[in-house]
Image: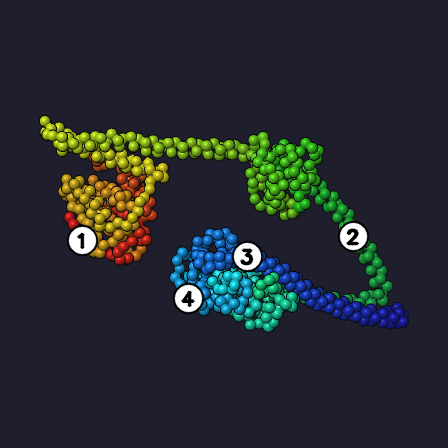
């Protein structure tokens, strides 16, 4: 091998290494420069997008607040004119419904007289004359320093105790004489619904600031009602008003929560209000920063790979240079190249064979999918991501035919629905077919719900669409005709049963009225005979018989009365006539009614009443009926020589009558049966006494009509306690929180 050839070869290798290192250095420099520029541009684009989004949101917010303030201003002018027509003597409580219809944002409207005292309000008809002369919204109107509607700072109401924005307008005649000041109290959340519809993120805010830099409302994820930090002064530079005049988004740290945001401030047209929308700067740049970190990681990794590759290539150049010097190495390289070419050819042939096999498998899968869809007994359809029908089974074509379209494949969903509407396929399509079709198309587009579709031929289908990973949708139409018909039949049966129950109730009411008339005659004539009013009875036994007839008639009349009350309650025609009634009077009257029964069984009757008089608001006749029913049951089921006690207990939480006996008692299951109408506990003891099972049922229903509850505590063989619990609001006289004090009377 000649020395000149070897030197030339090594010189060429050194030049190649210098060129390689220079090229790699240039590539690295370009890569890093592009990465930095790309990241700077991404941050700039993210900030521009956030600024535009903040501008759009602030414009929407300002527009909505402007509309709301216009509505409030118009309403305030109309109401002020009405009050001025009455020379300030109109009680706006009388027009509260009209104000509510004119603007739902107003939680309270008030009129303040010229001296600063509350004259009238929509909250109550005759409010106390609260001194409001210290309020700013009154002072500016009283002094005449402000013309039109004044938007005050948020204050806490002295009547509602709620934080609201105060809007005020001067009420005066044509000569400028002051009649008073009209004030609307508006919660910040009523000025706009935008924060409820727009996702600002966990740290985004929307603010409403006055020209005085006082915060009127601040909406955020933690304050959807807009009450967070209201009333605070925004001590920032530039101020929101200055930023709104500039009209450009700015980046600054919020003085309230110290979070850096990109803000867009905008004036509300026609009002001294500035809306500010702040989007979290960290969230805005999160994607750009993440992309920057990923890009720097990739560029750094590429740099490391290139450096290692250069080192490897430099070493390989030295090695190859040495090999090139030897002709044997050149020959061996040629053979290796030929072998590599042959291997590549073999790999290409193998790849072509694999491609053909994959194609055949795909065709087999498509055939199987088609067969599987055809095997589905219900209508089934598949649409692509552009809502074009790409496949459906025969069941779908039979259920929803399109005779005017030879091949429905490739047709869009809305075109097929319009064709079905034109054919009259759907039974329940309304006259406004465009609206119906728009709603059906929207449901299909969302692909997340199910709707029932009725066809003109009487069939019903449940239409279900679901989104596929490819972006298309699959739809299944399940025939539910039998289920719909079964449901209609059940509904008809239910209606028929309700009609039968109503007829039964009317029958009981009519029969009760029919029975009361002859019973009153029987009782009256038997009373005449028993008391021998018309003269002595020839046979004394006849008077005894008349007494028995009189007692039986009274008993039967009581049963008929109970049945009539039960039927009235069930028919919804049972009315209460409430008035204040003394508890002692009720208790004494009920005790006197059952005392003859108790004396026959030698029972001890005990009353326990509070020491001080107390009255409740109730229907005295019906509440006395409840107590008599409970005492009658207690006397009836208490053995000879037992004891029955009637308590009245009052506390700060409730008031209650309690009837306690030491009679036969009941189990929990028997107690549930006892309060049901016409139900009796089927045992030997019950069958020994009269009654149709209405006493406890009527007592429970009448108690519930008074807003109370009936509680039963009973133990078999021990006794029973029944409580009539009434709301504490029904106490109209006597000390609240009175404790039960015993004054027993046997």
Q: CA distance from mark 1 to mark 2?
A: 116 Å
Question: Which residue does the numbered mark 4 point to in the structure image?
Answer: 131
**Residue ranking furthest to the front:** 175
Whether pointer 1 and pointer 4 mark residues with C-beta atoms closer than 8 Å, the reply is no
Q: Which mark is residue 193?
A: none
* Residue at the image point whose x is 85% and y is 71% from the top: 11
* Residue at the image point whose x is 46% and y is 54% from the top: 96
Instruction: Pick whichever of labels 3 and 2 is earlier in the sequence.
Output: 3
Q: CA distance from mark 4 to mark 2?
A: 102 Å
Quick check: 715 left or right of 146? left
Mark nearer the viewer, 4 or 2:
4
Instruction: Pick whichever of labels 1 and 2 is earlier in the sequence.
Output: 2
**Quarter that holds the N terminus:** bottom right
Instruction: Pick whichever of labels 4 and 3 is earlier in the sequence.
Output: 3
Mark nearer the viewer, 1 or 4:
4
Assign a secondary structure to mark 4: loop
Question: Which residue does the numbered mark 1 point to in the structure image?
Answer: 743
Question: Which residue does the numbered mark 3 point to in the structure image?
Answer: 74
In percent of width and height, residue 33 lies at 73, 68
Assign a secondary structure to mark 2: helix
Quick check: 166 left or right of 388? left
Instruction: Pick whichever of labels 4 and 2 is earlier in the sequence.
Output: 4
Whether pointer 1 and pointer 2 mark residues with C-beta atoms closer than 8 Å, the reply is no
Q: CA distance from mark 3 to mark 1?
A: 67 Å
Mark nearer the viewer, 1 or 2:
1
Assign a secondary structure to mark 3: helix
Instruction: Pick whichever of labels 3 and 1 is earlier in the sequence.
Output: 3
Question: Which residue does the numbered mark 2 point to in the structure image?
Answer: 343
Quick one: 731 or 435, which is closer to the camera? 731
């Amino acid at each position: 091998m000649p020395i000149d050839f070897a030197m030339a070869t090594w010189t060429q290798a050194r030049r190649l290494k210098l060129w390689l290192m220079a090229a790699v250095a240039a590539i690295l420099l370009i890569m890093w420069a592009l990465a930095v520029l790309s990241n700077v541009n991404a941050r700039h684009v993210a900030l521009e997008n956030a600024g535009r989004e903040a501008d759009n949101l602030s414009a929407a917010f300002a527009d909505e607040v402007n509309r709301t303030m216009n509505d409030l201003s118009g309403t305030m002018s109309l109401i002020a004119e009405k009050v001025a027509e009455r020379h300030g003597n109109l009680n706006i409580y009388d027009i509260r419904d009209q104000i509510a219809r004119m603007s739902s944002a107003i939680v309270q409207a008030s009129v303040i007289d010229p001296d600063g005292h509350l004259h009238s309000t929509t909250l109550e008809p005759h409010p106390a004359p609260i001194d409001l002369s210290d309020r700013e919204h009154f002072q500016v109107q009283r002094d005449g320093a402000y013309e039109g509607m004044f938007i005050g700072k948020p204050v806490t109401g002295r009547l509602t105790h709620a934080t609201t924005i105060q809007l005020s307008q001067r009420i005066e005649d044509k000569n400028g004489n002051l009649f008073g000041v009209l004030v609307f109290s508006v919660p910040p959340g009523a000025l706009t619904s935008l924060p409820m519809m727009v996702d600002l993120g966990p740290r985004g805010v929307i603010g409403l600031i006055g020209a005085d830099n006082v915060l009127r409302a601040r909406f955020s994820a933690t304050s959807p009602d807009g009450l967070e930090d209201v009333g605070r002064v925004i001590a920032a530079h530039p101020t929101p008003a200055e930023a709104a005049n500039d009209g450009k988004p700015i980046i600054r740290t919020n003085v309230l929560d110290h979070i850096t945001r990109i803000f867009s401030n905008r004036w509300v047209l026609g009002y001294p209000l500035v809306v500010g929308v702040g989007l979290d700067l960290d969230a805005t740049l999160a994607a750009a920063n993440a992309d920057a970190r990923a890009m720097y990681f990739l560029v750094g990794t590429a740099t490391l790979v290139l450096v290692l590759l250069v080192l490897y290539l430099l070493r390989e150049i030295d090695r190859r240079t040495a090999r090139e010097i030897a002709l044997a190495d050149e020959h061996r390289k040629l053979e290796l190249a030929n072998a590599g070419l042959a291997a590549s050819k073999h790999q290409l042939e193998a790849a072509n064979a694999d491609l053909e096999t994959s194609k055949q498998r795909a065709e087999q899968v498509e055939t199987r999918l088609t067969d599987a869809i055809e095997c589905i007994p219900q209508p089934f359809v598949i649409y692509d991501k552009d809502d074009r029908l790409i496949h459906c089974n025969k069941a779908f074509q039979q259920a929803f035919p399109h005779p005017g379209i030879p091949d429905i494949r490739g047709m869009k969903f809305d075109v097929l629905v319009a064709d079905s509407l034109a054919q009259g396929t759907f039974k329940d399509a309304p006259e406004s077919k465009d609206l119906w079709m728009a709603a059906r198309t929207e449901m299909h587009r969302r692909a997340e719900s199910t709707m029932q579709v009725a066809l003109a031929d009487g069939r019903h289908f449940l239409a279900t669409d679901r989104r596929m990973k490819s972006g298309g949708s699959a739809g299944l139409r399940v025939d539910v005709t039998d289920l719909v018909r079964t449901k209609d039949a059940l509904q008809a049966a239910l209606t028929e049963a309700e009609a039968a129950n109503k007829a039964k109730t009317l029958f009981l009411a009519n029969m009760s009225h029919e029975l009361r008339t002859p019973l009153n005659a029987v009782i009256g004539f038997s009373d005449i005979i028993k008391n021998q009013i018309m003269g002595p009875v020839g046979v004394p036994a006849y008077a005894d018989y008349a007494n028995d007839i009189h007692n039986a008639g009274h008993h039967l009349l009581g049963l008929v009365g109970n049945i009539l009350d039960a039927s009235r309650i069930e028919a919804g025609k049972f009315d209460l006539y409430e008035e204040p009634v003394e508890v002692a009077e009720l208790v004494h009257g009920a005790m006197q009614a059952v005392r003859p029964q108790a004396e026959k069984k030698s029972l001890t009757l005990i009353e326990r009443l509070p020491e001080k008089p107390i009255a409740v608001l109730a229907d005295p006749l019906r509440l006395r009926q409840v107590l008599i029913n409970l005492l009658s049951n207690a006397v009836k089921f208490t053995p000879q020589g037992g004891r029955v006690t009637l308590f009245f207990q009052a506390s700060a939480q409730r008031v209650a009558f309690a009837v306690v006996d030491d009679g036969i008692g009941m189990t929990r299951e028997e107690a549930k049966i006892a309060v049901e109408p016409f139900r009796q506990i089927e045992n030997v003891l019950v069958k020994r006494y009269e009654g149709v099972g209405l006493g406890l049922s009527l007592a429970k229903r009448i108690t519930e009509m008074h807003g109370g509850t009936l509680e039963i505590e009973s133990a078999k063989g021990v006794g029973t306690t029944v409580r009539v619990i009434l709301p504490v609001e029904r106490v109209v006289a006597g000390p609240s929180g009175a404790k039960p004090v015993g004054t027993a009377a046997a």
